[in-house]
Image (tube, rainbow, N blue to C red):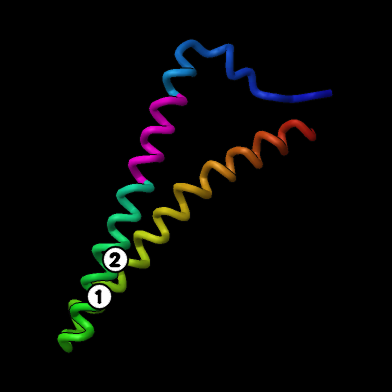
Amino acid sequence: MDVFPDFGGLGGIGDLKVVIGAMLTIILVVAVLMVIVSAILWAVASSAGNPGLASKGRTGVFVAIGAAALAGGGVTWINWLVNLGEQL
């Protein structure tokens, strides 16, 4: 028995997929920009001998990388759950 969600049974699902795809793109672009800005801040603060600002830049880099990983990993996780549902 194949169990698979009926994505066509919901009205406006195509529009929802477009909106989610656009949001994912925006999240990934902002995360990459934040990595660049935070890495520059971290490098400049470290070379200037400002440990407080360097710590904030390092935190910004790690938070942006985590956000990009969560945004990209969410799609993979949903696909894995859909494939798991087919096997039930």
Picture coordinates of residue 49 (x, y %)? Answer: 17, 89
- Res. 42 mark: 1
- Residue drawn where x is 51% and y is 45% of the image: 74
SS of the residue at dot 1?
Answer: helix
SS of the residue at dot 2?
Answer: helix
- Give yes or no for residue 24 being in the magenta stretch: yes
Amino acid on which the number 2 mark rests in the picture? Gly
Q: Is residue 57 left or right of residue 88?
A: left
Question: Which is nearer the eye, 76 or 28?
Answer: 28
Relative to 27, is 46 above or below? below
- The part of the chain drawn in magenta is 17-27
Task: Please state which of the two labelled residues, at mark 2 or mark 1, is closer to the viewer.
Answer: 1
Q: Earlier in the sequence, mark 2 or mark 1?
A: 1
Q: Tags 2 and 1 in contact by the CB under 8 Å rule?
A: yes
Q: Main secondary structure of the magenta part?
A: helix
Picture coordinates of residue 40 (x, y %)? Answer: 24, 70
- Residue drawn where x is 74% and y is 25% of the image: 3
